[in-house]
């Protein structure tokens, strides 16, 4: 198929805070490999919702 659109950026420090948080949460949930291989579209809606929920909680703090 086509090229991978959402590969993990090389330098995490250059990412906006929200994007960095998404990658950190994906790593904590053991989903970072899927994101690297298939991009964010490779996650199920359940996994995406988990990440979004955790990021939202952390942003409130």
Image (cartoon, helix red, strand yellow):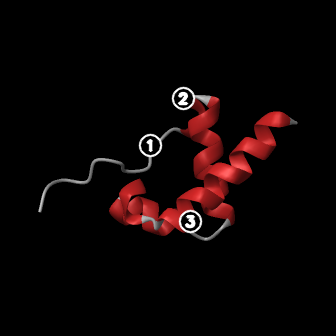
Q: How far apart are marks 1 and 3 (CA)?
A: 20 Å
The residue at which mark 1 appears reads as: 9
Q: Distance between the residues labelled 2 and 1?
A: 9 Å
Q: Is mark 3 on a helix, strand or loop?
A: helix
Image: 47 above or below 22: below
Neighbours of disc 3 within 10 Å: few (<14), some (14-19), many (20+): some
Do the residues bearing badges 1 and 3 touch, measured as CB atoms within 8 Å?
Answer: no
The residue at which mark 2 appears reads as: 14
Q: What element carries label 2?
A: helix
Residue furthest left as drawn: 1
The residue at which mark 3 appears reads as: 47
Q: Which of 20 and 14 is in front in this view?
A: 20
Do the residues bearing badges 2 and 1 touch, measured as CB atoms within 8 Å?
Answer: yes
Q: Name which of mark 1 and mark 3 comes first in the sequence.
A: 1
Do the residues bearing badges 3 and 2 touch, measured as CB atoms within 8 Å?
Answer: no
Image quarter for residue 50?
A: bottom right
Give the percent coordinates (x, y) of residue 5: 28, 47
Neighbours of disc 1 within 10 Å: few (<14), some (14-19), many (20+): few
């Amino acid at each position: 198929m086509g090229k991978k659109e959402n590969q993990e950026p090389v330098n995490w420090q250059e990412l906006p805070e929200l994007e960095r948080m998404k990658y950190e949460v994906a790593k904590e949930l053991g989903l970072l490999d899927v994101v690297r291989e298939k991009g964010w579209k490779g996650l199920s809606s359940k996994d995406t919702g988990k990440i979004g929920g955790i990021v939202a909680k952390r942003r409130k703090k």
